[in-house]
Structures are given as structure tokens and as C-alpha cells.
Image: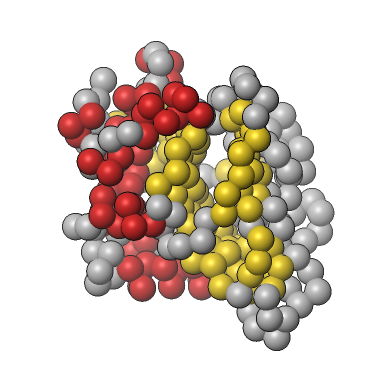
Amino acid sequence: MKTRDSLPAEFSQIEQEIIRSGYAFRSGREIQAAMKHCGLDTSWPLFASSWNDLGLDLYMADGGRYRRRRFASFHVADDVIRRKPHQPHYQSRDYNILNGGIQRCFAPILEEVANHDFMLKLLGDCGRLFDIISPSSTRSSPWHAEVHQFRIEAGQEESGLPTPEGMHRDGVDWVCVVLINRQNVSSGVTRIFDNQSGSLNEFTLTDALDTIFLDDIRVQHSVTPISRLDSKREGFRDILVLTYRHNPV
């Protein structure tokens, strides 16, 4: 079991917030403070610009061409973070009624992105945080972590759908969602439904590094469609998603 001393001070209250609400939010400013030695002041523009080089998601069962992505998976345990051989992404239709039930093969995340100090620290800090919160060894490390780079594009006439499957779980144990960039779009409201209390909360990620930590067993989440503010300019929402599920191997 990891100790709270192993986490950045900015994460110190997340445990109780997740226990109370099923999720926790940290502003971009707080995340930047927690990651201050991870090159954010010098290499962030290069890291964020990698979202300009994502492949089109051709698996959208709704026929949409508004989503681009790359994908990678990692073994995360103690202080060991190891990238796994590239593999397809799979969700059952129990969790993704739109696109689930098939092996989806996405382009791999580039090595310079996967090895960036920010990415590695976030992977490790989330693993330690989720170990602390996990109620039993069945929801603790070693973790199978999956990393997704998403760009949702809003067209001149077509909205972009961050969660075309609607309110859902990802079918894992824990989720971390980080806003990388949003340009010339409105809406994109995150909605979180607590299965236990039946309550619905909502807010909008607006600034780079705004981050949500989710207990995927307890809560469901969705994001409202995005539209262009100026129809003549490109509009998009860039997101980094990390998911964690217990891996007994």
C-alpha cells in the first residue's frame, strides 16, 4: 500500500473527495504545481502539439469523422512503469454500446510522447493515488494502464461528440482525464452521475491541465457535444485519458 507522502501535496485531499463524491477535480494550476519538474515550462508546447498528429478514428459506428486518437498501454506497479507491446483497444458492449464488442486498432502513441516526463509522472502518481484509494487488493497494483490521446473536432455544420456513447462507465477501476487544449468551441460540459446517490454533477474543463479523477466503479460520466464559436475557424477539444484496471499478472 502506498503512503500519502509519496504523492504531490496538491493531491493530498483527492482521496477523501473521491470517497465522498466518486470523483475529484484539480485545476490546471494545481496540476502544473504538482508537475513543476516535468518540463512543463520548456517542453509543454511540443508535448501538446503532438495532438496535431493523431489518426482518424475509423471505428465510429455512428459514421462520424469527428474523432482522432492514438493509444498505448502500460504496466504500472510500485516505481516501475513499462510500456507494453502495442495491442488493440477493446471494450465490451456492456460499457460501450456504440463501438464496443470489437478489437479496435489505433496508431500507437509516439515514443517521445510516451516517454515525456509529464506522461511518466502522471502515470506513476495516478498509480500511487489509486493504490491508496483502492479498498482491497483486487483494485490495486499492478495496474494495466491504457493511455488515449483524443481530439474531438467540431465541423462547420457538425458538432463533435466527446462521448458519443452517452452516459457510461469505461469498464475499468479508475480514470484520469486531462484537458490538453480547447480551441474555438463552446460547451463540452462534463457530467458525472453517482450510481450510489443518484446525484448528477456537471462542470466544464476550460484550462490546460484541468484534470478529473474518477472512480469508474461508482460513477458514470459523459461530455456534451462541442460546436464552433466561429464557424470559419477550426474548433477542437484535446484530451488525455488514462484508465487503470487491476492486473494480477
In the rendered view, tell whether residue 86 sits above or below residue 226. above
- Give the residue displayed 43% in from the left and 72% down from the top: 49
In the picture, the quarter occupied by the N terminus is: top left
In the rendered view, tell whether residue 158 sits above or below residue 197. below
Q: Is residue 101 visible?
A: no
Q: How is the image coloured?
A: secondary structure
Task: Give the farthest residue toward the top.
Answer: 136
- Give the residue displayed 57% in from the left and 54% down from the top: 204
Residue closer to the observer: 142 or 44: 44
- Give the residue displayed 34% in from the left and 44% down from the top: 123
Residue closer to the observer: 210 or 67: 210
Residue 39's x, y, as percent?
A: 24, 64
Q: Is residue 174 visible?
A: yes
Left or right: 168 in relation to 212: right
Which of the 4 image quadrants contains residue 135?
Answer: top left
In the rendered view, tell whether residue 15 sits above or below residue 138. below
Residue 179's x, y, as percent?
A: 48, 57
Residue 55's x, y, as percent?
A: 59, 65
Residue 175's x, y, as percent?
A: 49, 38
Which of the 4 image quadrants contains residue 195?
Answer: top right
Residue closer to the observer: 58 or 121: 121
In the picture, the quarter occupied by the C terminus is: top left
